[in-house]
Image (tube, rainbow, N blue to C red):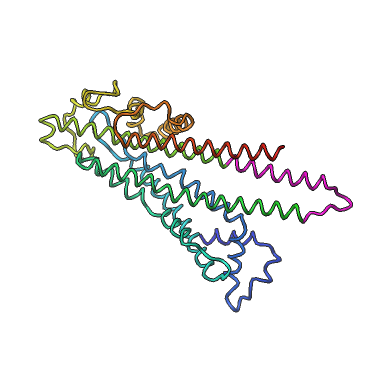
Amino acid sequence: MRSLVMRCFSFCKNGDVESQGSKKDGTIIPKTLAKCYKHFHWDVAFLVVCIVAIAVEPIFFYLPVIKEATKCIAIDTTLKIIAICVRSFLDLIALGDLVARKKIYIKSHDMIMSTSDYVINILSILPVPQVIVSIIFLDMRDYKSRHRRKVLNAVVLLQYVPRLFRVYRLWKRVNETIVKKNAESSKNKIPTKGSSTNKVNAESNKNMKRFIVMKAGFNLLLYLVASNVLGAFWYFASIQRETTCWQLACKNDIGCSKSSPSFNCGDGFGNYTFLNDSCSLETRNTPLFDFGIFQEARQSGILASKDFFRKTIYCFWWGLRNLSSFGQNLETSSDYWENYFTILISIFGKLLFLYFIRNLQVYMQWET
């Protein structure tokens, strides 16, 4: 984190050094930091880190893997280690940024850190996926805990709320800084003998076009990240629906109910061939269970694959396809959590579409 802060010093102008204070009174570091944080380059860099953090967060959803031959669930240990390391590294960057900003706001009387900003940053770096995904995996063993699993699923999704708020505030701050700089640049550039008003206006228009293109790129990136998150959660929920069907079928089978199987690959194997009929891959709606929107994941074979890129691309395409169509082609079961998920897809798809239309209108008004 120290190296990142030192890089930030390079963004400050040389002319500002005189007002930074002396080394003797110990105020040069906080004042320099304050000036660096006021520069939008730092906010842009941290905005990229926050977006990357949201994009890689769904790795945790791909940890469970189903072994169809033995009807059990395993954890991809290699992927788990990678996910924890990546998430911890990004959280350390966010924590270092929070601590540095807090010190600046304490030592700079003209800067105040709002309580909402502080709370949002704290909630964003909580290790929710590391803890809750592991709990959900353990709860898959017990049929009675299925309602608690659904609540935990909602908690995992809700953790994206403070992360999205953090990205939104950073993006808003970057926007305001760019607009302000463009306005000041146009105001200060007075035409000289060797230049003309048209030349100044052309440069201002060029900067404005870059700003609009950047906003369009951010809108596209937000769309892609949302598709990635929804697709990954669809995979994770498909695993849970599969295990729920196994537990229901086992509950109705005399021999299986007596043995109380955990369906964990580490606990040994049993004779669960009856599950091929009770939880068939061929039909979505069996006499015992309706898989709804998760039947496609079962039939595609991605639930049993350890090929991370294959699973990611397929689930990303599923999320992008249904987000673009507002979830109109999804055929759900009567499960209310499944319907909540499809409602979320529909609402979020419409919000992203409206945001895109708004940016398009701004561009058209600027062109005219």
**What residue lies at 22% left-to-right and 43% top-to-bottom?**
145
Considering every residue shown, the one lying at the far bottom of the view is 24
Q: Is residue 17 left or right of residue 6?
A: right
| Residue 207 inside the magenta-drawn segment | yes
| Residue 70 inside the magenta-drawn segment | no
Across and down, in percent, residue 324 comes to 49, 31
Across and down, in percent, residue 312 comes to 42, 35
Q: Is residue 102 left or right of residue 185?
A: left
Q: How many marks?
A: 0
**What residue lies at 24% left-to-right and 28% top-to-bottom?**
289
Q: Is residue 358 left or right of residue 161?
A: right
Across and down, in percent, residue 31 comes to 60, 69
Segment colored magenta = 188-217
**What residue lies at 53% left-to-right and 52% top-to-bottom?**
169
Q: Is residue 342 above or below residue 127?
A: above
Q: Is residue 199 above or below residue 250?
A: below
Name the quadrant containing residue 29. bottom right
Across and down, in percent, residue 348 comes to 46, 38
